[in-house]
Image (cartoon, rainbow, N blue to C red):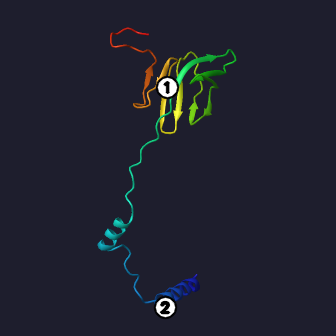
Amino acid sequence: MKKWAIFLINIYSAVALADPSPLGRLFFTPAERRQLEQSSPPQPPSTPAPLPKLEINGIVQRSDGKGTVWLNRQPIQEDTHQENVQIGKLRQNSDRVRLDLPQHRLSLRPGQHLDTVTGKAVDNIVVQQTGTTH
């Protein structure tokens, strides 16, 4: 053990004496930083990807427990992934479908769609200014 300690001290001394020059500046000077900032183009602000059009048209849950969700008028098996949308597993006696998007999670019922501006669930009922429904 004593031999190793002496050996390491000798190596450290040899390395320290071999290159006596200082390390130099580790960071840029203020002038160099300004020059770097001026030479690099400004980065545009990152905007989140727009939300896709999603509408739940219906849900069927078979007696064997497997379910099908009609998403944008297309039948899709529950608990699958399609077009950047993960369709969750249907719960017993529930009328909601969990949808997982890359940066958004929501739950929709049949007859609802995703408002792509607000990111919230909206009923598909159209109400005119007079207050009547269609």
Q: Amino acid at mark 1?
A: Ser
Query: Under tag 2, what secondary structure?
Result: helix
Q: Quadrant location of the C terminus? A: top left
Q: Residue furthest front?
A: 129
Percent of width and height locating residue 86: 57, 33
Percent of width and height locating residue 105: 48, 32
Query: Under tag 1, what secondary structure?
Result: strand
Label 1 – label 2 distance at C-alpha: 68 Å
Question: Residue 128 versus residue 14: which sits nearer the camera?
Answer: 128
Mark 2 neighbour density, 10 Å: few (under 14) some (14–19) many (20 or more): few
| Residue occupying image coordinates x 48% and y 39% | 103
| Residue occupying image coordinates x 56% and y 86% | 7
Q: Quadrant location of the N terminus? A: bottom right
20 over 60 or under it: above or below: below
9 over 35 or under it: above or below: below
Q: Which mark is residue 118?
A: none
Disc 1 designates what residue?
Answer: 107
97 over 131 or under it: above or below: below
Percent of width and height locating residue 38: 34, 66
Disc 2 designates what residue?
Answer: 18
Mark 1 neighbour density, 10 Å: few (under 14) some (14–19) many (20 or more): some
Question: Residue 23 versus residue 103: which sits nearer the camera?
Answer: 103
| Residue occupying image coordinates x 64% and y 21% | 67
Q: Residue furthest top?
A: 132
* N-terminal-most mark, 1 or 2: 2
Q: Residue furthest left?
A: 30
Q: Nearer the viewer, mark 1 or mark 2?
A: 1
